[in-house]
Image (spheres, rainbow, N blue to C red):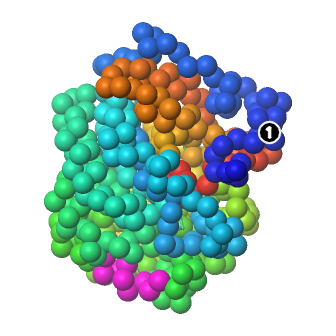
Amino acid sequence: MPSSCDGRMGPAGAAAQNAGMDARTAPLLWIPRVASEAAPLDGTLRDRRQRPWRDLRISLTDRCNFRCSYCMPRSRFGPGHRFLPQAQLLNFEEITQVARQALALGVGTLRLTGGEPLLRRDLAGLVRQLAALQTLEGTAPDIALTTNGSLLAGQAAALRDAGLNRLTVSLDALDDAVFQRMNDVGFPVAEVLRGLEAAQRAGFERIKVNMVVRRGVNDGEALPLAGYFRKNYGAGMVLRFIEFMDAGCHNGWKLDEVLPSDVLRERIAGQWPLLPLAATRDGETAQRWRYADGNGEIGFISSVSHAFCGDCTRARLTADGRLFTCLFAPQGHDLRPLLRGLQGSESLLRARLAGIWAQRGDAYSEQRERLRRLQPERADMHVLGG
Ligand code: SAM
Ligand code: SF4
Ligand code: SF4
């Protein structure tokens, strides 16, 4: 029986929802609309807060070769943990079908994630399949990947050749001992740095490097990492600092361990003065800053201290085919039965996706304090893909 924290809601979560939430925060209760009502082809699909759907994050596996304590703590995800069996994973054709219909509804970016997406066999083959799809504007989709970088050195060139446009690599420390403590599998930082070099050689530009900051655990690594990327890559890589989030319900999240981005930014600016930059696109998660001396750019993803739900354009597809409209939603919409019974026609799928988006009202980060009490069950990060 899967735990309630894998995003399959248990009785407590349903009761909490029924007790306290309105329809905007109760995805369990909505009833899908019919096809005729919900499938615009001109990109005007909006949710209940008038937010368009622009990004689809696709988790390819719930497995990972790291055990980052803020995501898959070893105490909970040890040798006895049962991951999804292969038969329950969406295959590449099913993933492509969802992506194709999401693009038909206005999505432009497909981000591959996990668990660790580089563990999925023939990832380059999937990228090739997705790169052949078209957005509403008739262009190829923007395809991005988030990875822990451990297997990147061997795969970067093939992924680039297959059509991967953008890369985000997670890296929580520069010091090897701290990094190994963070990943909790003894993985050396040098190998991730080698992956980053390989990715740059393969032609990836402006690679993003994500550091999750836990106060008192690895916040001392923020300045060394900033110094490293300024010195070695300048504008070629963009380091982003992510506030530790209360995703899932196994990572021991405490507000005390969140270092607010403003505090961290002042620390960094004390060493290297910073100037603000405008967002590059609507729905951008990071606040961007550049070094005043011209040595590159950094970003802050501040889901806890500065909620950005107002322009959230993202939905997430789990490896077993559930669509989540919020990173903190207690459960997703199971598309797999529909996908496995489609028999060639995808119009029902498009109607279902449009209906889900049209009913969406999520804004967890804006209401964190209240919803944490009402909705104690949240899907885990390695299931949703971040
Ligand atoms: N395994 C890949 C990786 O680590 O990049 C992809 C999946 S991981 C779930 C996606 C992103 O979520 C990573 O950048 C990771 O650092 C971030 N993440 C995971 N748990 C988090 C948490 N509790 N708070 C903030 N970010 C988190
Ligand atoms: Fe794995 Fe990524 Fe989660 Fe770390 S953050 S445990 S690398 S899925
Ligand atoms: Fe989007 Fe939910 Fe995060 Fe708000 S809390 S930004 S709605 S994913």
**Percent coordinates x, y for residue 371 in the rendering:** 74, 42
**Percent coordinates x, y for residue 160 in the rendering:** 20, 61
The majority secondary structure of the magenta stretch comes to helix
**Which residue: 37% across, 42% down?**
95
**Quarter of image, res 288:** bottom left
Residue 297 or residue 148, whichever sits in front: 148
Give the labeled residue for mark 1: 11
**Which residue: 54% across, 81% down?**
185
Is residue 195 inside the magenta stretch? yes
Left/right of residue 61 with respect to residue 199 in the rendered view: right
**Which residue: 76% across, 47% down?**
376
344 is higher (above) or lower (below) than 270: above
44 is higher (above) or lower (below) than 131: above
71 is higher (above) or lower (below) than 78: above
**Quarter of image, res 100:** top left
Q: Residue furthest top?
A: 36
Residue 180 in view: yes
**Which residue: 53% across, 15% down?**
33
Is residue 384 inside the magenta stretch? no
**What residue span does the magenta drawing correspond to?**
187-196
Which element carries disc 1, helix, strand or loop?
helix
Left/right of residue 318 with respect to residue 147 in the rendered view: right
Mark 1 residue crowding within 10 angstroms, few (<14) / some (14–19) / many (20+): few
Q: Indicate the quadrant of ligand 3 in the picture.
A: top right
Residue 47 in view: no
- Amino acid type of the residue tagged 1 in the rendering: Pro
